């Protein structure tokens, strides 16, 4: 099973080749989505001018087909530690600065002993990451 990040869902809804990996996993009835991903997607689509009804439809689709994982104390503490690690990783690789959401999503994957499915270059080469980018 995998944890889907925002990138994976965006690719799925675009219908891209990268998004087919999400589709393949969904067909098996597997996958988890951090609750913060729902917020990131809603923000993205609202900024792009999507109607609220379409945004809701997409979020409900995700909720119906994956387990939504929330943020708890353990996730928060691990995310704080991971943020520092991601920041160092980003500096060494001349990558973008990570966000707290990045650290939370990665923490959820690691705490659930799952791989993170992403195409975000920030995560490329990290443990327990299934990279679909490039």
Image: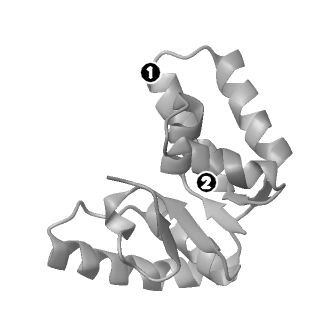
Q: Which mark is residue 131?
A: none
The answer to which image quadrant residue 25 occupies is: bottom right
Q: Nearer the viewer, residue 59 or 1?
A: 1
Q: Is residue 91 left or right of residue 27?
A: left
Q: Residue at x 54, y 49 (%)?
A: 8
Q: Residue at x 75, y 26 (%)?
A: 57
Which residue in the structure is indicated by mark 1? Answer: 48
Check the image and report above or below for 57 versus 38. above
User: In x, y percent, where is residue 87?
Assistant: 28, 75
Query: What number of labels is visible?
Result: 2
The colour scheme used to paint the residues is one colour
Q: CA distance from mark 2 to mark 1?
A: 19 Å
User: In x, y percent, where is residue 121?
Assistant: 32, 60
User: In x, y percent, where is residue 81?
Assistant: 45, 86
Callout 2: SS: helix
User: In x, y percent, where is residue 32?
Assistant: 73, 61
Which residue in the structure is indicated by mark 2? Answer: 36
Q: Residue at x 71, y 79 (%)?
A: 112
Q: Is residue 56 left or right of residue 64?
A: left
């Amino acid at each position: 099973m995998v944890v889907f990040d925002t990138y994976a869902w965006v690719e799925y809804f675009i219908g891209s080749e990268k998004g087919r990996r999400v589709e393949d996993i969904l067909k098996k009835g597997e996958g988890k989505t951090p609750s913060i991903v729902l917020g990131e997607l809603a923000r993205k689509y609202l900024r792009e001018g999507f109607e609220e009804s379409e945004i809701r439809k997409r979020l409900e689709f995700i909720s119906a087909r994956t387990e939504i994982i929330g943020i708890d104390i353990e996730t928060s503490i691990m995310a704080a530690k991971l943020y520092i690690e991601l920041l160092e990783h980003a500096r060494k690789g001349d990558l973008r600065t990570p966000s707290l959401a990045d650290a939370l999503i990665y923490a959820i994957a690691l705490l659930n002993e799952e791989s993170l499915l992403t195409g975000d270059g920030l995560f490329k080469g990290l443990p327990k990451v299934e990279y679909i980018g490039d």
